[in-house]
Image: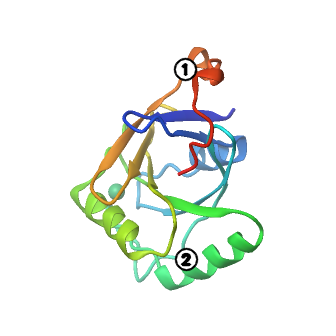
Amino acid sequence: MALMFKGAVSDIVVEFDDSVVSYLGAHTSLECEVGGQLFAQFGSSAVVIKKITQSPVLGKSKRLLFQPDRTIEQTVIYSMFKDGYHYVGDWHSHPEEIPSPSATDLVTIKSVFINSLHVLSHLLLVIVGTRSLPCGLFVGLQDKDQLEICNYMTALETGKNSDIKPDTAI
Ligand SMILES: [Zn+2]
């Protein structure tokens, strides 16, 4: 089932496609952090995450220290773009029930936002914990200054799609 989240300040709506939700649900990890990239298509009222990848890790993957190989990631960004998918952010797992970003995560996503080539106003930081989804999912939107928390939208809220402003592409 697709899951939708909404930025607490920006009202940007982020939708996780069925296949992406299943993938995240199958990649909870107690042993070491795994992670990768998120790719989306921009709908009229939401950013729809349709592709998710797992990135090769530089050196040894250590618990609580996910360090992807950024060179390989850049290659993936180009090939996804050719297929019509836009790089919109990163995901990784945390060995905790309800995940929240570590101090390192906050520094990393901000530096990715500032240093990577993109035309977006925000980049997504998604963390998957060990609890079932959506409880075990942290979704944040990083801009040049801060990380904005996104809240899970209940069925009632997602039914009110007419309230959502069009063209909320990030
Ligand atoms: Zn983390």
Q: Which mark is residue 154?
A: 1
Across and down, in percent, residue 74 comes to 56, 80
Q: Is residue 119 above or below residue 154?
A: below
Q: Total of numbered circles in the picture?
A: 2
Q: Report the image quarter containing ligand 1.
A: bottom left
Q: Residues within 10 Å of mark 2 (few under 14, many from 20)?
A: some
The image's colour scheme reads rainbow
- Tell me the kind of residue under disc 2: Glu
Q: Helix, strand, or loop for circle 2?
A: helix
Identify the image quadrant of residue 160: top right
As helix, strand or loop, the secondary structure at mark 1 comes to loop
Image coords of residue 99 (percent x, y)? 36, 43
From the Cβ of disc 1, is ligand 1 less than 8 Å away? no
Considering every residue shown, the one lying at the far front of the view is 166
Q: Which mark is residue 73?
A: 2
Q: Is residue 122 above or below residue 66?
A: above
Nearer to me, 44 or 158? 44
* In the rendered image, the vertical position of residue 74 relative to residue 88, given as above or below: below
Residue 8 quadrant: top left
Does residue 99 appear anywhere in the picture? no
Would you say residue 36 is visible in this rendering?
A: yes
Q: Amino acid at mark 1?
A: Thr
Mark 1 burial class by Cα count in 10 Å: few <14, some 14-19, many 20+: few
Q: Which is nearer the eye, 155 or 92?
A: 155
Q: Position of residue 16 (x, y in %)?
A: 62, 42
Q: Residue at x 55, y 20 (%)?
A: 154
Instruction: From the viewer's side, name the closer residue of 122 and 94.
Output: 122
Q: Where is residue 166? Give x, y as percent.
A: 62, 36
